[in-house]
Image (cartoon, grey):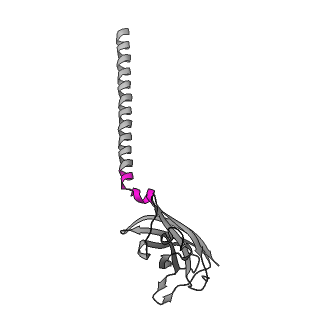
């Protein structure tokens, strides 16, 4: 009787050990699957856009842009990558999205992109861009600046793909 009781305890312990080993194996397999999913997700992110490029908004000059008019404002930007400045860009290489506009404020658009006049004579002068921005045209005329803060997102686009963006704010008063 005592031998049977000891044998049962040994048998139960071996079953418990097997169950623990199975749980560990299942946890290990779940970890492997998770690692594979993360690796697959990371591979789908365009590494060039995350690591190589950046947009810098160097200056915002509102000039005569005031609430109720549609005068152009000027922003100076540059695009860089690991090797240095990205040069020779034009209006087709940028996209501007209005994320937030004040009450009665409208969508903002880029009207022109050129080498920044203040940068001429400096190294990489053709790699610093001056952009004229203003409220977008509409079918009946032009929208007007609203009184308050605008939040814009500037995208750098190459071959139809957004490589990097920069969000920035300014206030029209």
Coordinates of residue 105 in the picture (x, y in percent):
56, 79
Q: Is residue 68 magenta?
A: no
Residue 67 against residue 153 in the figure, above or below:
below
**Residue 142 point in image, percent of width and height:** 51, 87
Q: What residue sits 37% from the left and 24% below the top?
A: 17
Q: Position of residue 118 (x, y in %)?
A: 57, 75
Residue 100 seen in render: no
| Residue 50 drawn in magenta | yes
The magenta span reads 40-52
Rendered position, 9 above or below 116: above
Q: Quadrant of the C terminus?
A: bottom right
Residue plotted at (48% across, 73% down): 96
In percent of the image, x 48 and y 66: which residue is there?
A: 79
Secondary structure mostly taken by the magenta-highlighted segment of the chain: helix
Question: Residue 33's quadrant in the figure?
Answer: top left
User: Could you tell me residue 47's position as x and y percent?
Assistant: 40, 56
Between 47 and 5, the residue placed more toward the observer is 47
Please indicate whether residue 33 sits to the left or right of residue 105 in the image. Answer: left
């Amino acid at each position: 009787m005592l031998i049977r009781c000891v044998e049962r305890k040994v048998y139960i312990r071996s079953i418990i050990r097997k169950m623990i080993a199975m749980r560990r194996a299942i946890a290990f397999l779940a970890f492997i699957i998770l690692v594979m999913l993360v690796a697959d997700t990371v591979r789908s992110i365009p590494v060039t856009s995350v690591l190589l490029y950046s947009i810098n908004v160097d200056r915002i000059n509102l000039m005569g842009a005031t609430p109720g008019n549609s005068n152009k404002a000027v922003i100076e930007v540059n695009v860089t990558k690991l090797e240095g400045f990205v040069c020779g860009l034009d209006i087709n290489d940028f996209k501007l999205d209005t994320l937030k506009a004040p009450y009665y404020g409208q969508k903002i658009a880029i009207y022109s992109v050129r080498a920044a006049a203040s940068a001429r004579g400096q190294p990489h002068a053709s790699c610093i861009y001056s952009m004229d921005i203003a409220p977008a045209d509409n079918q009946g005329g032009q929208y007007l600046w609203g009184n308050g803060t605008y939040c814009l997102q500037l995208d750098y686009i190459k071959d139809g793909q957004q490589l990097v963006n920069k969000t920035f704010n300014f206030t029209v008063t």
